[in-house]
Image (tube, helix red, strand yellow):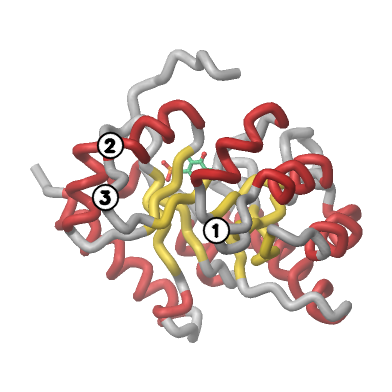
Amino acid sequence: MTTISERLQAIRSRIQKAAQDAGRDPESVMLLAVSKAHSSAELQAAFEAGQRAFGESYLQEALDKLADLRTLPIEWHFIGPIQSNKTRPIAENFDWVHGVDRLKIAQRLSDARSETLPPLNVCLQVNVSEEVSKSGCAPADVAELAHAVAALPRLKLRGLMAIPEPTSDIALQHRQFRMLNTLRESLAQQGLALDTLSMGMSDDFSVAIAEGATIVRLGTALFGQRQKRADSEH
Ligand SMILES: *Cc1c(COP(=O)(O)O)cnc(C)c1O
């Protein structure tokens, strides 16, 4: 049995190696621990092993853990699909939201973000595996959405996020991640400089780092397999 602390250490060194292989500073890649389906006690163990940023996908489950762990200085990221009737609790409780893919959701998050908190960090989710329609803004629509979101008062637009189609085709993994990086570069040319590319999960994070990821979102590699969840929130 390996402990969470050993797994964290192993992951950190794989991230470091992937960054070095890509000629990048390892400090430029942040590990987001995706803790959905894992208990508050497991999160606490990861926290005690030095992990500070945690990603959750299901609102009610996340709010329960936030309550359990409220005394710890954790940076909470909401990475799940965002229903428009859930924007208020998300805006009130999280530090980051990764899955913003339409202006209406962004506006509601901005409206609900309290003046007493710093602006909410957001990433725009882009559908980089175009043929399948999933969540995510179409690549052709990213620029317009980005400019509109950047103008909202209580949000801080940080970057782009993608969940590519899972594939064992390494060249395809590279292409999908590269598309996100290319979109970021074209936004920068339009005067919208963003510092974040949230991409890469347990099975493909080394490729994502090679293509410029600044946040990798790892669940299974860190906490082990998740139990299948009865999906009551959707
Ligand atoms: C569950 C999830 C992850 C983590 O996936 P693993 O394959 O377990 O690393 C990353 N990002 C999002 C958006 C997720 O929903």
- The nearer-to-camera label among 1 and 2 is 1
Residue at mark 2: 68
Pinpoint residue 94: horizontal percent, then vertical percent. Answer: 51, 48
Secondary structure found at label 1: loop
* Residue 127 is at least partly visible in this image: no
Mark 3 — residue?
Answer: 71
| Residue lying at 49% horizontally and 30% vertically, measured from the top left | 58
The residue at the point 80 percent across, 75 percent down is 192
Q: Where residue 93 sits in the image (x, y, percent)?
A: 50, 44
Q: Is mark 1 within 8 Å of ligand 1?
A: no
223 left or right of 92 in image: left
Label 3 neighbour load within 10 Å: few <14, some 14-19, many 20+: few
Residue lying at the far front in this picture: please name it: 116
Three-letter residue code for mark 3:
Thr
Q: Residue at x 19, y 38 (%)?
A: 41
Question: On the image, numbered disc 1 is attached to which residue?
Answer: 117
The one of 188 and 163 positioned closer to us in this rendering: 188
Q: Amino acid at mark 1?
A: Leu
- Work out which residue is located at the far left of the displayed protein and give it: 1
Q: SS class of the residue under badge 3?
A: loop
Side of 171 where 223 appears, left or right: left
N-term-proximal mark, 1 vs 3:
3
Q: Position of residue 4 (x, y in %)?
A: 18, 50
- Mark 1 to mark 2 CA distance (whole Å): 21 Å
Q: Quadrant of residue 82?
A: top right
Q: Residue at x 64, y 50 (%)?
A: 113
